[in-house]
Image (tube, rainbow, N blue to C red):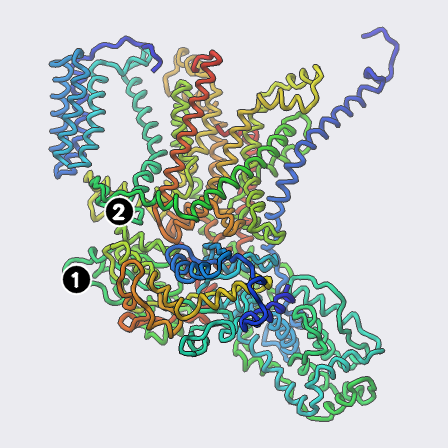
Amino acid sequence: MSDSTHTGPMLAADGTPLKRSLRRALRAQKMRALALIAPLLIFVLLTFIAPIVDMLFRSVENQIVGNTLPMTVEELRDWDATEVPDEQVFRALFFDLFLAAEAKEHTKLGSRLNYEKSGISSLFRTSGRDMNDIGEVFQDALEEIDPAFEEASTWVEMMSGGARAEPNARLMSNQIARLEALEATTFSGDAEFLPGAAISDILPNTARAYAAFAAFTQFVDGKSVTKEEPWEAVYAALALDLEDPATKTAIASYAGPGADNLRQAAAATLPPIAMRDAFFESNKDWANVTFWETIKTYSPPYTTGYFLNAVDMEKTPQGIALRSEDERIYGILFQRTMFMSLMITFSCVALGYPVAWILANLPTRTANLLMILVLLPFWTSLLVRTSAWKVMLQQQGVINDVLVWLGLVADESRLVMINNQFGTIVAMTHILLPFMILPMYSVMQTIPPSYLRAAKSLGANNWTAFWRVYFPQSVPGIGAGSILVFILAIGYYITPEIVGGTTGTFISNRIAYHISSSLNWGLAAALGTILLAVVLILYWAYDKIVGIDNVKLG
Amino acid sequence: MKLTKTLLATTALTVAAGTAVTAQDMANSMTIVSWGGAYQASQDKAYVQPYLAANPGVTATWDESSAEAVAKLRAMNEAGNITWDLVDVVASDSMRLCDEGLAMEIDHDEMLAAAPDGTSASDDFGDLIVSDCFIPQIVYSTTFGYRTDMVPAGTEPPSSVCDVFDLAKYPGKRSLQKRPIDNMEWALYCDGVAKDEIYDVLGTDEGVERALAKLGTIKDQVVWWSAGAETPQLLADGEVFIGSTFNGRLFSAIAEQGQPIAMLWDMQSFDLDGWIVPAGLPADRLARVMDFLKFGTDTQRLADQAAYISYGPARASSAPLVGKHAELGIDMAPHMPTDPANASNVHIYDYEWWADNRDDLDAKFQSWLAQ
Amino acid sequence: MNGFTLTPVETKPLSFSLPVIGAAGGFVGLFVGTAHGSGLMGVVIGAVALMVLAYVALVVLGLAQEKITRWGLVALFIVAGVLLAGVPGFVLGLLFGLFFSWFIFWIGEGRYRANLAPYLTSGQVLWHYAFRVICGAIFIFLITPILVVMPLSFNAQNFFTFTPEMLRFDPAGYSLKHYQDFFTSNEWQQALRNSLLIAPAATVLSVSFGTLAAIGLSSEHVPFRRAIMAVLISPMIVPLIISAAGMYFFYSRIGLQGTYLGVVLAHAALGIPFVIITVTATLVGFDRSLTRAAANMGADPVTTFFRVQMPLILPGVISGGLFAFITSFDEVVVVLFVGSANQQTLPWEMFTGLREQISPTILAVATILVVISIALLTTMEYLRRRSERLRGMSPS
């Protein structure tokens, strides 16, 4: 077009190519926008999103079994789940449970597994108490053979292998790490005691048990290992080591500290080690193979168990199966939550539409006054409104009283309007109605009344004019209000709790129950994740259909 | 975390011995957790206010979170940030907290005051010390109250717990707690199971079905409650004819509010309520709490509480000191669940059994409710 | 209402107004009748009585005596009410009297047509008023719970029940003790202080962050706009129980659980979506050339923001702030989890009051709050009208 011969890129005033200059301006604009958004985004991510992600993670977390019973889980890996495990597994269980009981962590595991199998809770609780007794047999025997075994100093010297012995630092750090996992904490400072390398080769079990004891004494109890007599489990471990003839040979040629005491112990006869029988005696349920199945099934660090539970299924040795009919509840609850939220949404549309219409078509002055009536309940405490509905709806309540007084209902057959779905729907419709009216109103305000008049002057009757002209334009308002109300309704908790009875409660009530009463936080998180997924899908649909920018509140 | 805990346990012993710690080493505020309502008010009047009066400069804050105590203590422990100093819990919760190491173990004789006649604290509390961490305060019961003006004309007022299940004789709604505990036992008892066999029967699938079937006969007529204040409200409204709740609530509705309600003590279910001290308190706060506990759980203080609410003091030595209601001036002894006239047929609920079977039965119960 | 009439009012023939008024009388008579034993008798008596009254009022006394006739009718109804049902009858009689004294003239003189277009058919007129009655019923539905709460807060008993004394309007059934309880109890006063501390702090946080972000979001070139929007809106759509539990665990871990800061942060997060939504909505209509013009004339961005942008989006910011405030002021689930004894807010106190000792004190609190919010809302409406008048705008 121009007669200029210039063929290069178009230049901005300062001589840079216009394209680059524009791009730079655009980038600056983008950066400015992001800089404005960033503080809030970081704020929401930290104060809101992080907590939720953190909680949802609980729905798959299952480290507790592996952390509490690490050796047992290891031994169970090859167990074929047909009969009660052998002595080897019970020995591992003894040492695991002994430490767990000292750390008072065994009952937590008991309650965790009790969600899957009733009775495990008491199994761990009662047996945890018996661990000392089982080990005491060996302690008594060894102390009788050589009273030196009563002395804390004998043990420290013997297990450290003397002042100049080469230490087995790995064994100690493993035990500390294990204790840290068990207690879900971190310890600072160096270990006061390190087992000797030579002695831990000869007496592997004893070294491990003693290292665990030493770690616990130093870091958890805050005492010095040089002054504490070892746990019964250490004596049992020594007895276990001495059971092996190879150990006896090795001791014969061992020259480190305490070698004499060990030789004396090796020469004597110790009580037989029968952990399996000892456990059976402690609680006969250890002989029940289904309990072991549960332990094995839930030994991996992550589990789908909570999610299965949340959809009324369970893990069985035969695979995943539906729960027995009398234990299914979440399917019903999810269905009911959806159904009632839909009902509430429909009632809100039905009641909100005329109100929004009249507000949008009345003179502003009157509309603003009536708006106060809409906003007033919105400003009144949710709890108060819910209790007011209780007062209104109950059988001796205001509505029934009026109906009886008017003679429409007999005194004996007062209507049941509360503690059921009806009560929840009425109360929640009332509570959520402003959320429907406000977006509808803001959409309807933008529809010029002249359209309707034009339609009528063109010959449409009232209904046609409304249905073909006005209604389609108000649909975005209905959509916005509906999804808002539905999303809010689906997660409601307080109102159904107060007026819902048994048939009018939502899944949220169950989540709250699992958080504060049954303490099954994993299941609560799984239920919450499912609920959140439903809400997010709805949100996504909403954003697609209506666009989140089009929500207006007043 | 646990290191400090153990160190503190030793300080606690010295506190109790009353040697090392002086008032300067004690924190000046306590957060005490309880149930709210009239019960908390009675604790405030009988224990806390007298203690604060004797220790000027000390303040106490109440937190009405006992219903969520186990959940909150567990989360506080996970976070290593214990904000509570003393927590009022029911016996079963105290066992759970003690088992999980969330509550501090108590040496009752060392830490608490002996009875005036010299009986040691542990003998004075006797069997009520159901866990090593538990300091019993009161014996309460879950029992029934009914509207006297709604008893059908010409019928005897209800006298047995089984009347709750008798819709023909006593029509009208009932209110029961929304949990399996107590309800299942009452159902089996009224279905003809002997009292000492209830838990054996309930341990089987058939037993559970039988209990639910019995409850099913009145299911349509039941309003399920979850907070102690609901049944008195329902009775006051005439919404239900008969309902279970804690006996102190009924006492307050009958004696203090003058409602036309009467007690049905048959097969009342005994339970205990008491203090636990959260594990892991800093030394100064622990010292303050132990100082308070020594005062607040002595014989006189427990007896004083009975002047405000009809729960039986947990110390044997307090029973003879129970006097009159602080405002109404009526004798409190006949309103205690432990009064011989009221306790002729009681149900002792088995904590251990429920600890094991709670999850399972609760799932069945809730699914039954939802159907 | 508008001060002018669309259709000239003309007196209706008695053949129209008497049956209509009679039907209304019959309808009311039905209820009064059934309450006293016979519905049919009620209908007949009601219809006949109202027709006679209408005839007397419209024909015998006529328009000239309207004022006196109206008062006479009210008095008549009150006397009838008292004779039939004592003190409650007085109230009902007063209400019915006021209604019918207006209704008779409204129908008889054809005043109902005044504000409607003259070409409407009778059917359309009927629908017009039927629709208004329906809307009125919905408005009543919206505020009845509040109307129920108010008298109950004067209950002399500690239950949420209309006692027989209250229904008889016996002064013994009423008392101010729940109000006294609210003003003298330490817990309630502490809760009020906490609420008044936490809610404004949370509002300031969410409004300041939220407004900035909304301005950022409204610029044309924001990368990942959808995703960012979803994150910022999430506190509104994530079910409260999930938010509460998540914050509880997380805040415990970082030492915020049971602190004022924790509750304020949690409430600020919950209020943010409202600020974002309302402020972005106002920004949609914002003319961006204004900021460019300001920049052109040499204003720096901060000046532009405070002098040009802020005044224009202020209504959106204020309304977002109100929503954020009420979110925090009325929030119970999250504060129950994140707060501890020292942060008990009014809703917390109400919740425990409701759960542990159903006491009408919470109704007294609610009544006070309702009265305050009515005062606030009407003041705002009054101020708005005043500023409109001052600016010389006609009211709508």
Q: Tag 2, which chain? A: A
Q: Are marks 1 and 2 in contact (CB under 8 Å)?
A: no
The kind of residue tagged 2 is: Gln
Q: Which residue is mark 1?
A: B155
- Nearer-the-camera pick, C87 or A269: C87
The kind of residue tagged 1 is: Thr
* Spatial CA span between label 1 and label 2: 23 Å
Residue B318 horizontal side relative to residue C33, left or right: right
Residue A143 horizontal side relative to residue A8, left or right: left
Disc assigned to residue A320 = none
- Dot 2 surroundings within 10 Å: few (below 14), some, or many (20 or more)? many
Q: Are marks 1 and 2 on the same chain?
A: no
Please indicate, yes or no, whether residue A514 appears anywhere in the rendered image: no
In the rendered image, residue A352, in percent from the top left (x then y), is placed at 40, 30
Q: Is residue A324 above or below residue A526?
A: below
Q: How many marks?
A: 2
Residue at screen point 33% across, 74% down: B195
Q: Which residue is mark 2?
A: A396
Residue at screen point 43% across, 33% down: A434
Secondary structure of the residue carrying tag 2 is loop
In the rendered image, residue B241, in percent from the top left (x then y), is placed at 25, 56
Secondary structure of the residue carrying tag 1 is loop
Residue C364 horizontal side relative to residue A159, left or right: left
Please indicate, yes or no, whether residue C363 appears anywhere in the rendered image: yes
In the rendered image, residue C358, in percent from the top left (x then y), is placed at 35, 50
Quarter where residue A7 is shown: top right
- Dot 1 surroundings within 10 Å: few (below 14), some, or many (20 or more)? few
Residue at screen point 46% across, 28% down: A440
Q: Quadrant of the N terminus of chain A?
A: top right
In the rendered image, residue A103, in percent from the top left (x then y), is placed at 62, 70
